[in-house]
Amino acid sequence: MDIRREDVARAWAEQVRASQEQVERLGETGEPADLYAPWARRFALDPRRTDDPAVNALLAIARSDETWLDIGAGGGRYALPLALHVRRVVAVEPSASMVAVLREGLAEHAIDEVEVIAAAWPVDRKVDADVALLAHVGYDIPEFGTFLDAAEAVVRRVVVIMRTSGAARIDEVLWPHIHGEARRAYPMLPELRELLAARGVEPEVSLIERGSWGYDSREQLLAAARTLLHLRHGSAKDRRLEQLVAERATERDGSWAIAWTPMQDGVVSWEVPA
């Protein structure tokens, strides 16, 4: 590994660890065993939806004869739509609550072309695929270069979806009001582009806009914020959070959010070097 590649990989890891250190220093709880349990049902989406910019971007580059490896597949928000258009999808997901939602979605929509691997990447088994999808994966992975290496080893093309910034995230918005300092950001699209450049990769990049991600109820929003801010239920900080949510949460078309600022994602793709 050359010096620049090492430096960029180290900078990514340091940024992740700085964000994690802030959680350890200011949070009242550790990382939950299943971070997504309070809101996993939010990812039970119609696989035939046509108003999702990310899905549309993926389907535009997916071919019917391909097998896609969806790393961090969650509740199947991309795996299920892809399965309707490609030969097969291998969905890798470690969260038990997300895997449950994924399996329910497969049964509900009678989709058979998805193999579910309930494990963290990389998995301890052989995987045959043409394209690896990493959608909103990597923000909190210090050794993300190694993570990418494992994906590139089994496919010929990689597609990453990553936020351009975290400014509209619920924890970014509320963190200063609860913890008294700005949230330290995880690496996002700018850092990914630098990481890839250091690896000698010149990817294709397109930007897509999506609306703010609302919650099904004010109570669900509060539960998600409590988890993301690492608060103990009933603490002084938690009572402050309850007050802020009561004051600032608003409802639109059955969804609740603190901020309705549109967010921008990057869709980054590249061919794996021979």
Image (spheres, grey):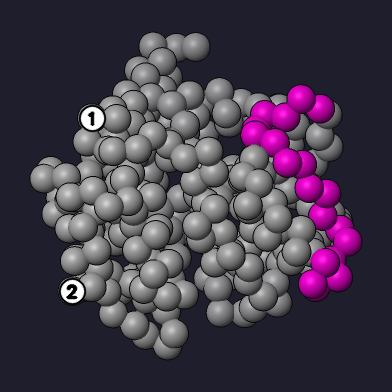
Q: Quadrant of the C terminus?
A: top right
- Identify the residue shown where x is 54% and y is 53%: 37
- Identify the residue shown where x is 61% and y is 26%: 149
Residue 212 pos. (x, y %): 37, 70
Residue 79 appears in the rendering: no
User: How many numbered marks have been drawn onto this rendered protein structure?
Assistant: 2
Viewer-closest of 126 and 240: 240
Amino acid carrying label 2: it is Glu
- Label 2 sits on residue: 247
- Label 1 sits on residue: 25
- Which secondary structure lies at badge 1? helix
- Identify the residue shown where x is 22% and y is 36%: 26
Q: Relative to 153, is 142 on the left or the right?
A: left
| Residues shaded magenta | 107-125
Q: Relative to 120, is 66 on the left or the right?
A: right
For the stretch drawn in magenta, what is the main secondary structure? Answer: loop
